[in-house]
Image (cartoon, coloured by chain):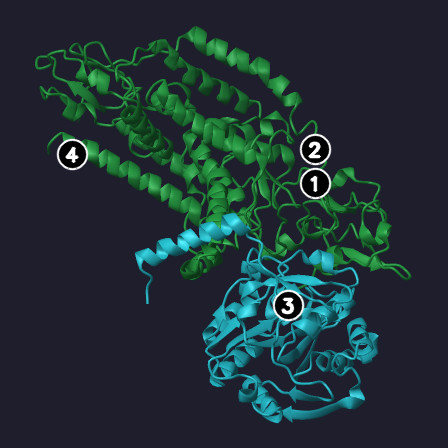
Amino acid sequence: MGISRREFFRDLGLAAGAATLLGREASGVDEAVWPYAPYKTADVIVCEGTAYNTLLTRAFDKLGGLKKYIKSGDSVLVKPNIAWDRAPEYAADTNPFVVAALVELCLGAGAAEVKVYDNTCANCRRTYDSSGIADAARDAGAKVSYVDTALGKTLNIPHGVAVKKAEIYADVLKTDVIVNVPIAKDHSLSGLTLGMKNLMGILVEDRGLWHQRLNQKLVDLAQVVKPTLTVIDATRIMTANGPSGGGLGYVKRLDKLIVTTDVTAADAYATTLFGLEPTDLGVVKEAKKRDFGTADLERMNVSRVTA
Amino acid sequence: MPPGVWKWLRRLSQVTFFGAACALIFATNYPLEADLPYDIIPRFSPLLAVTAMAASRAVVAAFWPALILVALTLLLGRAFCGWVCPVGALLDAGDFVINKVFRRRKREGEKVSHRRWRILLLVALLAFAAFGIPLAGWFDPLALFPRTLATSIIPYASIGLDKLTLFLYDAPSLEGVAIAVRQRVVPENVVLFPGHVAVAAVLTGLILLGFVRRRFYCRYVCPTGALLSVVGWPSPFGRRVVGAECIECEICRNVCRMGAISGCGESTAQAECNLCMDCLPACRQGATSFAFGRARSPENPTTWAPALKRRDFLVGAAASLAAAPAVLVTDGRVHRDLFLIRPPGAREESEFLARCLRCGECIRVCLTQGLAPVHFEAGLTGLWTPRLVPRKGYCEYLCTLCTQVCPTEAIKPLTESEKKIEFIGLAIIDRTRCLPWVEDEDCNVCEEMCPTSPKAIELRGRGRLKPYVIPDECVGCGICEYACPVEGDAAIVIVGDRDRVYFVGGGGAGQRHRSDRGT
């Protein structure tokens, strides 16, 4: 369906009018409402193995099936960590095969489209290519695009403790379901970078300014942008020199995935992979203080699948 | 073949070469996977070849295409100027508009002796090159054209497209189009530098000189054309007039864009003629032809005008030799800006300056657009050589694009593993502005961004963690300076001349420690 010339000029006129009268300042969005499960206890599925497709299918089945979270015709954002210009084996970016498996499953569950993007730290073109994610996700059927930092929308965080609003990529607001797929990595300031830290990839503002009172800001953001599902990629984890890594000596192969609907529970459980306690991680401590999600291992309903 | 056909063939050739040159420069972009000879345009210039080799005292084999041009010129005269040169094509287009729109009278009075200025410039450039100062790239069309496109036209066009698509994005039905275009454009970090304006002004000026004369630059300025004049004037091919049929109407003389026809039309300055073929269909008598054969005959006095008199030559050479030391005093080799960061793989400064053609290919290809043309930070003679401005765009750790497109290997090609240990600068923290140091705020952006392994920035301290630079690990990529959240100038800056920094804690800043970073 094309647009007629008349429509073209009408829209052009509207755009001109809007741009002159209002400027390009986007109107603020109050709370973004993405569906999420209530956090009394959390079901945490720990997958072990290398057949990611099978593992994830079984894990989602334990959570009630992926169709419970993705309605037919939904627009799904699979949000990996595509931050650094590194090959997959350096564990600086999410495993491309995990991303591809998720894309396939979401499409299989009836998603109208599955989008994959992240606001990279290193140059986006190199990072998308060398991480292997762009190719893998595109082959799996995803719409892979760069985060366009000029197209932001202000997300108000009225109950934010450290931050009251965030400039996020406008496309995120057109998304029905967010599937958060971080890789578990070392990070000098936040200790580890996991599920909540991964959400910083939808910000289009100067993220350098987020690093003061980082943990509080991360929880502020996660409370508003609640990912429907979080899948922590611990197939390889980076144990030092994070978050960019760069040496194979920092990488430990675990072949694990942590699947849950509760991002706090995901982060809390993932600390154990590094031999830590959940409260060793500032962001989990902050979430626990606010009673956001399930920070205690005892309250988690952990089950395992292997394939 | 009717005489008018040649003119159209020439136009077709100009459009083709112009389009190909633009397309090639535009394609000089990540990931360079098309396997094209991205750096070939400047390598066709015999002037750049001679001056770069003289200045660097080395044979640069990459200049083999210049030999093709010399051979062509020996055979056909200055056909390159009329049929191939992209700047020539642009000036022809400009002159056409100027003549049509402003209806300027075609007849141009001209002092032919002014033609010697370009020869004098050529002599001066050769003399400077002998002193190790190659300035030919400032004037050479095959450096000027890519430079202007790379450092000025493409960045400006990108900014325009950026604004236009943002504007279209607000229109409901055009949002998709805007996003599609932006996805292709936005990855280009669009950066403008003050230097871009000067580069654009030069080309604009050359076009506007068309108000004075057609092909003004080619007649009086272009030293490459001058060199081709010297090489090509005795060529066996050229314009011939059958004297018996010429009625001395002088139409050809007025048509000639180069002012190469003198007398009543029968006399051609072969050193000036660029074989545009305009005079062929203009000759109503059919007395004009282009042919091989003996150029000089009583009725065909092909002239080498203007002759460069020995006095001119000597004056030009002497003036250059006198000026050279004065220019050298301001040279970056004598006084180097501490913050001048050369691209990775750049040779030692003196050799780099000698080889760099100022063609802007590296600036074009730079992934982050952090490379900019310098003004005078590298001395007078360093004008338009590249420098990294990390606050605008850092050097991507594993990227080697600029090292792959340098025509003369002034920037040596690097592999990815060589790039990892290529030290281009050193980060220094300004402890009077850094957030953890003075504001008692958390911040690890520089450390987080640091791509080396192990990291060249370490967070240390009891309580509040503060960043420290490990000089031996720092390659000077500048991503820390780029990302530093402090407003205005960053609280961590890169100095380009590592050897002049002695005061950094930890010591060893002056030592280039090339540790193997492993895999």
Q: CA gap, disc 1 to disc 4?
A: 56 Å
- Position of the C terminus of chain A by quadrant: bottom right
Residue found 36% across the figure and 35% down from its top: B86
Q: Which residue is mark 2?
A: B337
Residue B338: which quarter of the image?
top right
- Regarding residue A15, the answer to whether it shows in the image is yes
Any idea which chain is the green one in this picture?
B
Any idea which chain is the cyan one in this picture?
A
Q: CA gap, disc 2 to disc 3?
A: 50 Å
Please, is residue B350 above or below residue B405 in the view? above
As drawn, the label of residue B5 is 4
Q: CA gap, disc 4 to disc 2?
A: 56 Å
As drawn, the label of residue B496 is 1
Farthest residue, direction right? B462
Q: Which residue is mark 3?
A: A30
Q: Tell me which amino acid carries mark 3.
A: Asp
